[in-house]
Image (cartoon, helix red, strand yellow):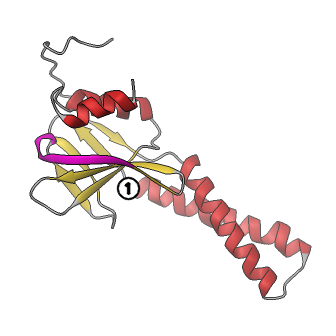
Amino acid sequence: MRLHEDCVHISFRKEDFRVSFLAPFLVVFVSALIVCEVFFILTGNNSSQVLFLLVPGIVLVLCSAAILIIQGRYKFDLGPDGISCYNFWCRPIKTSWDSIEDWRVVRTAGLSYLQVSVRDTSETIWIPLFVKRDLTLRKMLVTYTHHSHDLHQKLNQIWP
C-alpha cells in the first residue's frame, strides 16, 4: 500500500542486510573452476580424477568459505539517519540521506549494485542489491529517500 505523497511518513526502523549466498557464489565458483581447470590442463595434468573430482571439490570448499566470510564480514544497514555501507575498496562509509548527490545501478559480473555518490566527497558507496531480504531493502530505500529526491523517483521506476 502506497501512501499519498502529501502524507508524512515517519519511520524509526533500522535494518541490517547481508549479501545472499547463491548469487556471488555462482560467479566466484564458475570463474575459479574455469581458471583452475585450464591451469591443470595446461600444466599437463590430464587425469580425469583430478580434473573432474578433486579440483571441483577443492574449489567448492574454498569458494564457499570465501563467500561465507564475506557474508559475515560485510553487512550494511539502512535507517532514518542514512546508509552505513562500504566503498569499492571495502572501507566503511556512513552518510545521511540528504548527502546523496547522485546514484546509478551498476552490474558487475552479473551482480547488481546501487552506486551512490556522496556530496562534498569523492567517496562512492556500493550497496549490493543481491541481499537475502531484497524486498525489505527495496521498501526501505524507497521509504527513506524523500519523495522529491531524484533517487526516490528513480527507485520507484526500477521497483514499482
Identify the amino acid type marked 1. Answer: Tyr
Task: Say whether residue 73 is left or right of residue 100.
Answer: right
Residue 13 appears in view: no
* Vertical position of residue 126 compared to residue 52: above or below: above
Q: Which residue is mark 1?
A: 74
Residue at image position (24%, 31%) is 152
Local crowd size for mark 1, using a 10 Å CA cut-off: few (<14), some (14–19), many (≥20) = some
Q: Is residue 112 magenta?
A: no
Q: Is residue 17 left or right of residue 26?
A: left
Against 46, is 7 above or below? above
Q: Which residues are magenta?
A: 97-105
Main SS of residues in magenta: strand
Q: Is residue 99 magenta?
A: yes
Above or below, comparing residue 9 to residue 158 in the picture:
above
Please give the name of the residue rendered at 28% of the width and 64% of the height, measured from the top-left corner: 91
Badge 1 element: loop
Residue 117 rendering spot, x and y as whole percentages: 22, 53
Please tell me which residue is depicted at 59% across the width and 57% down the height of the picture.
27
Residue 12 showing in the rendered view: yes
Quadrant showing the C terminus: top left
- Residue 103 location, x and y as percent? 27, 47
Expressed as whole percent of the image width and height from the top left, the position of residue 6 reads 13, 13
Q: Position of residue 79 (x, y in %)?
A: 22, 36
Q: Quadrant of residue 133?
A: top left
Q: Quadrant of residue 37?
A: bottom right
- The answer to whether residue 120 is above or below residue 143 is below
Instruction: Residue 70: name its quadrant.
Output: bottom left
- Residue at image position (77%, 81%) is 40
